Amino acid sequence: MTLHPTDIFHSFYSLIHHFVLRFKMLAIFHKAFAHPPDELNSPASYKGAKKPKVPEETLREFLSHHPDNTFSMSFGEAAVLAYVRPERHFSFRPRLFCAIDDIYCLFLGTLNNLCSLNKQYGLTKGTDEAMFVIEAYKTLRDRGPYPADQVVKGLDGSFAFVVYDSKVGTVFAALGSDGGVKLYWGIAADGSVVISDDLDVIKEGCAKSFAPFPTGCMFHSEGGLMSFEHPMNKLKAMPRVDSEGVMCGANFKVDKYTRVNSIPRVGSQANWMEWEQH
């Protein structure tokens, strides 16, 4: 039987997608270092039988699901990062975890234009997705010439990432707009922010105070949540009710009729930490 090149491509893509789905990651940040939208917190979380858990319990549960191949790092009470190591090495997989200069990145998915991005930023050919995201973050943090939404919008592919800058306690997360990678976030019992692609862990740890992380959006611990696809439009919280009729953490959608008040700055004043709260 002769396979058409298109069939081979789709088979290879399906194989990559299969392993993308198998990788799991977890990030928890103390409420003092991350300020998610209030609408993510549901009062119903404290009325039912299942209540939100403290971060330590959520981490233990995540690690117990994969006892032999998980890795975790704690930063005092400020943050926890954890991920499931791949069972085998696949050269086409991007690095899931990377640390450079006390900046840590958890990355899921792939960037189709990684080679051109590395060239644009003056990075070596061996720079993978997680390493690139850290370098892009450093450029933004140090007052790069482009606003953050423009940088993230330039990433072509199915991706999600969480960056933690342990020197300054900054959190930066984003999810691609194509929906190829799923990401969820919620509120723990102590008000900490929990971010993971493991829906079961999110549900157990956050009770009803969780929601899908909005596609095409990015979150910064100081600047809040915004759409990098439509940076001039505000985000609108959409009530979300589960199958039991209970109010959960809100979804967030771009409000096409409400514009951001300020005009984005250009040049060195377009620091990513200055984007408007939504």
Image: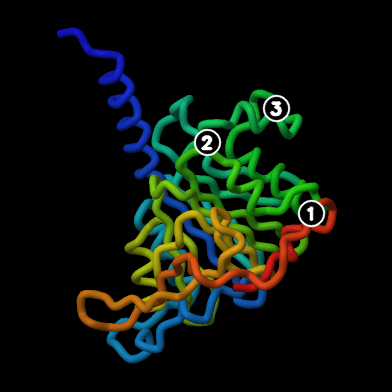
Q: Marks 1/3: CA distance?
A: 23 Å
The quarter of the displayed image where residue 158 is located: top left
The residue that disc 1 covers is 266
Structural crowding at the residue carrying mark 2, measured as other residues with C-alpha within 10 Å and reported as few (<14), some (14–19) or many (≥20)? some
Q: What element carries label 1?
A: loop
The residue that disc 3 covers is 119
| Outermost bottom residue | 47
Tell which circle, 1 or 2, labels the residue nearer the N-terminal end.
2
Relative to 106, 102 lies left or right: right
Residue at x 67%, y 73% (from the top left corner): 261
Q: What element carries label 2?
A: strand
Residue at x 31%, y 82% (from the top left corner): 50
Q: Marks 1/2: CA distance?
A: 26 Å
Q: In this view, does 45 lie above or below 89?
A: below
Amino acid on which the number 1 mark rests in the picture: Val
User: Is residue 18 something that shows in the picture?
Assistant: yes
